[in-house]
Image (cartoon, rainbow, N blue to C red):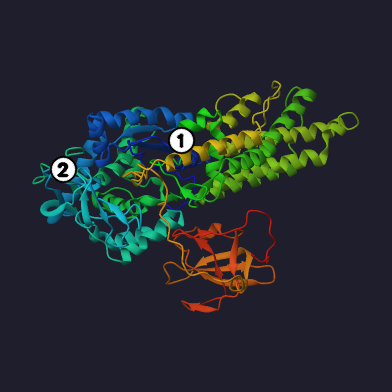
Amino acid sequence: MSHDDYPTDRPAVVTCGLPYANGDLHIGHLRGYIGADAFNRALKTLGQQSAYVCGSDMHGTPVAVNAEEEGVEPEAFALRWHEQYEETFPQFAVDFDNYGHTHDETNTETTQDIVLTLEEEGHIYEKEIQVAYDPDADQYLPDRYVEGTCPYCGAKARGDECDEGCQRHLEPGEVEDPHSSITGNPAEYRERTHKFFRVSDFEAYLTEFLDDLEGTSNARNQPRQWIEDGLQDWCITRDMDWGIDYPGEGAEDLVLYVWVDAPIEYISSTKQYTARVGADEYDWEDVWKDEGEIVHVIGRDIIQHHTIFWPAMLEGAGYNAPRAVAATGFITIDGKGLSTSRNRAIWAREYLEEGFHPDLLRYYLTTTGGLQQDVDFTWTAFQEKVNGELVGTVGNFWYRSLLFAYRNYEGTPEAEVSGEVESRINGAIEEVREAVNDYSLRGVGHAAVRLAQFGNEYIQRNEPWKLTDDEPDEAAQVIRDCVQLAKAVGVLLEPIAPGKAQALWEQLGEEGEVADAHLAEALEAPPRHFDEPGELFEKIEDDRVDELEEKLEAKIEAAAEDASETESDETDEGEADDMAATDDLEPLLEDRISFEEFQDLDIRVGRIEAAEGIDGADDLARLEVDIGFETRQVVAGIKRLHDLEELPGTKCILLANMEPAELFGVESNGMILAAGEQADLLTTHGDAELGEKVR
């Protein structure tokens, strides 16, 4: 691992949180897999050697429970979903170099080798613990067979995680008021011997690891609280049959906890890639044993596993640490979390059945907000982004430039690229380099779109259709520039929209794959001749969007009316199944205020101009907020929840007549408004001016 700018001379591996082999994929899941794929493609355009690996998470209690309900073996149940994922991912141009699963021979051997090494190094010990037991079913209850209350926040919790509240990892015996999901009866705690991993031994190492970690700020900042609270050792065995057997002595009837073998699949899948292509082309040991660049793209709900448990395991077993962990935000619909049980989701198969090109969704998911920010999906917002940026800017420039070139020159005019255009392309290339090194997919996509926007302005400013008769050389020069710009946009946009970029590549008459092109090829001359181009993007009409919105609303309402659908969502153990927060809301306050009292609140539209963390404060950030009349300094508890570097330029809502307060030595002169535990910043939908009052 290094901190050199990409590309480095060391191989990289990009991974994404494993899909849990327990149900259909929806757009919340796809955000992570598409994001990781786009980042891997972007690395390659920089010239970085990189592989994208993943696999299906086959183990854990939800698979066992659902398989039992269907009357099939867990392996057969999980393999069915695994095979479906293998078919679905390519349909969205998610191009894994290797896609395995956690139950295959490679992962079983690698997992057991790592666990034995940890045991030999003294990092594993035995301990008597309280394990939930169902006397009616006469069996111990692992993980998701247990339901109860979180001891930390009081929310409903299951087995190993408070997935509806604070999202903390829970050890066996911690859930209060336990009930068996098998019989529904109260469970009782009994003593049982299990194996524990000494996570507490790695406190100093993990602190240093987080100091060096790249990626998103939430992945760096959230784990610090867990370290400050005191690291708890981790129970790594479970009382069940489905899983990888514990390899050491004294645990013959136990299997390894799913969160042991799931991340090890990253290593195993990389091994399988090397076995297929040969170590001369890509050596997994260079990445995992030496100084390779490891990048994990994950859901926000599994930060703890990837920044505490996983790096501790790697360090204890003698493996390389990740260079970066990039945690994505959630996808919501109308401000509410996706829910598989309530059918509040847009499924991958549904999106494809609607006839939309996968690149449209790829662009929307990667460039709407920063990687770690929540994205509220509506078909209207999808339409606006596609029509405005892909159809109106990129597609319009590509088509008008190539069509004019074909009709007047049968391809690329014989002229040199102007200095202005060459400089602008070089600037866009540098924007992409910076975006990749900032782990900003939005930056990669926007660099390409801004270049196309410049192209539209350039052709409009120079009006070559007026020059062809009187100034033919000048007309040829302008169109030569435009064709070069079109090619450059295609090269830059390929990581985000690979299908459309390849279609442009072929229209230009280029050979091979645009995916193999490096950034420098954006300035290489296009072929002299090419055929008549076609339009590559199609406008989404209003009536189509109205139809889609109505269908989605009807689907959600129908599911909500089903009184039997009262169970909570089934959250994945490898990657959150719902990728969303709970639907539970705080009750409304009974006390009312008068209109006059509301009028006393001076709430203004503002824009964040600067944002930085406050030294010594885990949660606090210092913001400079322009509210039209002046710029206010405000302290907000968003340090862990937002990428502060991406906040400047963001509109916000400020309570301006809040009494000043001093926090950690910094005066706060106002309060920005946000919703929910993840501090979703309130903003305006239209173009309200800075300083306008909220009424």
Q: Quadrant of residue 561?
A: top left
User: Between marks 1 and 2, how big is the CA–CA gap?
Assistant: 36 Å
Name the foreground residue: 645 vs 41: 645
Q: Position of residue 545 (x, y in %)?
A: 61, 36
Q: Disc 2 marks which residue?
A: 246
Q: Inspect the image, locate mark 1, and give the three-letter code of the amino acid beneath it.
A: Trp
Q: Disc 1 marks which residue?
A: 347
Looking at the rendered structure, the secondary structure element under dot 2 is loop
Q: Quadrant of residue 452?
A: top right
How crowded pointer 1 is (Cα within 10 Å; few <14, some 14-19, many 20+) is rated as some
Q: Position of residue 177 (x, y in %)?
A: 22, 57
Question: Going 56% across and 45% down the picture, which residue do you hit?
Answer: 367
Side (left or right) of 293 relative to 132: right
Q: Position of residue 372 (x, y in %)?
A: 48, 52
Residue 540 appears in the figure:
no
Q: Position of residue 323 (x, y in %)?
A: 40, 51
Question: Going 88% across and 33% down the picture, which residue do you hit?
Answer: 471
Number of numbered callouts drawn: 2
Q: Sequence-wise, which precedes: disc 1 or disc 2?
A: 2
